[in-house]
Amino acid sequence: MDCEGFQEALLAAPSAADPGAAGAGHARGCPSCAEFLALNQAIADALGSGALPAAPRRVRGALFAELERLHPRPASWDWRALLTPPRLAWAAGLAAAALLAVRVAAPPAGPADGFSAHKAYVAYQDGPAVTAG
């Protein structure tokens, strides 16, 4: 078994700690594959035990700052670049048209004499009016 075949077989194995009989023999005779096996087992043990703590906040901040320095975001990702006067005017016109459409499509407010749906419901619940007589 060659080194590339050993490493591929180890990565494809269901258990990271099981290189197989031929792989174990190869790892004993090859220092780089033995190191790869040890590293693979350490990673599997760390992931299996759930012992990976969260990185401290300052480390995360430094990491994100370094990533931003190495791979800066394009200017198109800045939301403030989207607020140009033509776009704002277009958005305001669209909002006004939507409000007008809602107002036109809304049902009328009802009669002006103060008779409301609530009063009609109460009158329905009370039943026919009984007059003393």
Image (spheres, rainbow, N blue to C red):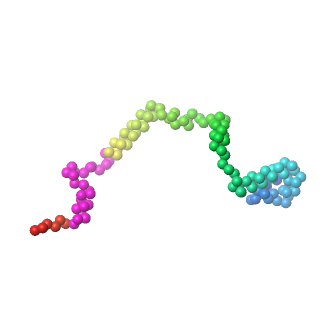
Measuring from the top left, give residue 71's x and y in whole percent: 65, 36
Q: Nearer the viewer, residue 101 or 41?
A: 41
For residue 40, side relative to residue 98 (left or right): right
For residue 14, side relative to residue 102 (left or right): right
Residue range corresponding to the magenta coloring: 104-127
Q: Nearer the viewer, residue 91 or 40?
A: 40
Q: Quadrant of the C terminus?
A: bottom left
For residue 108, side relative to residue 53 (left or right): left
Name the residue furthest top: 85
124 within the magenta span: yes
Q: Is residue 90 above or below residue 114?
A: above
Residue 74: in sight, yes or no? yes
The structure residue drawn at horizontal position 24% and vertical position 55%, both measured from the top left corner, is: 116
The structure residue drawn at horizontal position 36% and vertical position 40%, both measured from the top left corner, is: 97
Measuring from the top left, give residue 38's x and y in whole percent: 81, 52
110 within the magenta span: yes
